[in-house]
Image (tube, rainbow, N blue to C red):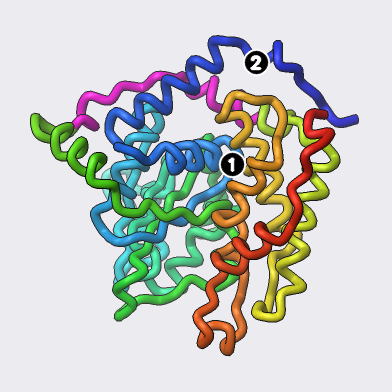
Amino acid sequence: MKPSITTNSRTEGERLTLATIKANISSVIVGKEKAVDLLLAALLAAGHVLMEDVPGVGKTMLAKALARSLGLEFRRIQFTPDLLPSDVTGINYYNQKAGEFQFRPGPVQANIVLADEINRATPRTQSSLLEAMEERQVTVDGVTRLLPQPFLVVATQNPVELSGTFPLPEAQLDRFLLKLEMGYPSEAEENEIVLRFEAGNPLDQLQPVVRQEELLEWQRKVRQVLVAEVTRQYLVQLVRRTREETDLRYGASPRGSLALYRAAQALALVRGRDFVIPDDVKELAVPVLSHRLVLHSNARLKGKTPRRIVEEILEETPVPVENLVP
């Protein structure tokens, strides 16, 4: 029997805490409320995020602000062509003083890991993250070690500079729950950014506003967020439509359906609800599905993009308006 929760089970204190987390992050990040919501939803859904955008729009700052607001350990890995898998996962080294081999943890042993410019590393090094992302563990010299919980990988890549890069294969792209774009700020937002950073970096004053135990409890509650039958059918219909598109070589797999379902539950929780509405699914369709689609070469020549195809599917698929609340 599917577990259920009621609106009363979401205390006012929890709602206020979620609002405080978002306000805390927004004291550093200006005008990116949707990105903050989606990143927090990815963490609650135990997923990972790929952020593709030009340098300087706040990708690293957003990941740091999230980690500090939640009191989580943050580590950054700068991916370069000479980075080795052991530089990510850790190594066993011989301690001469102790007379034995000891394990030196890699930077992946943290709660929030920023994989900066992930497409600049070789495929072998990129794949060293796969076990960590999928199974929350790393194996070095035959010994498996669990990663701390919660665990979130935020990978970034620059869509402009392609020279000297190694594009992520489809199998690895599919491991990311969301693909986000920050975008440039508006004129008013950019003016606010300049004023806010005039006296110093506001990130330095950021303090944790939630305990780690609360965060882990919210991760458990995500699976209890209710999804009405019509909303679930709408979600499945969107995913199946990607497999019928003639411009796509491959549509989204059942893993895409599960990712969209779990992300919608998490976003509803972030937005203060214990049930999913179709607008949650609609808002998440592009960031959850677009990076899982593979275009035909002729479609690419015609200027088609996975994002535009998902947007067209959303425009053509009727949104349910009845029986939305379970």
Mark 1 or mark 2, earlier in chain: 2
Magenta stretch secondary structure, dominant = helix
Tell whether label 2 touches label 1 (CB within 8 Å).
no
Q: Amino acid at mark 1?
A: Ala
Identify the residue at the far left of this view: 199
Q: Quadrant of the N terminus?
A: top right
Q: Is residue 128 left or right of residue 58?
A: right
Residue named by callout 1: 46
Q: Is residue 92 visible?
A: no
Q: Is residue 207 magenta?
A: yes
Q: Is residue 162 visible?
A: yes
Residue at x 38%, y 55% (from the top left corner): 115
Q: Does dot 2 land on a helix, a strand or a loop? A: loop
Q: Mark 1 to mark 2: distance in Å?
A: 20 Å
Q: Is residue 184 left or right of residue 227?
A: left
Toward which corner of the image does residue 256 lie, by quadrant?
bottom right
Residues in magenta, as a range? 202-220
Above or below, 215 against 231 in this view is above
Residue named by callout 2: 10
Toward which corner of the image does residue 122 lie, by quadrant?
bottom left
Position in image of residue 50 (x %, y %): 46, 56
Residue at x 50%, y 66% (from the top left corner): 127
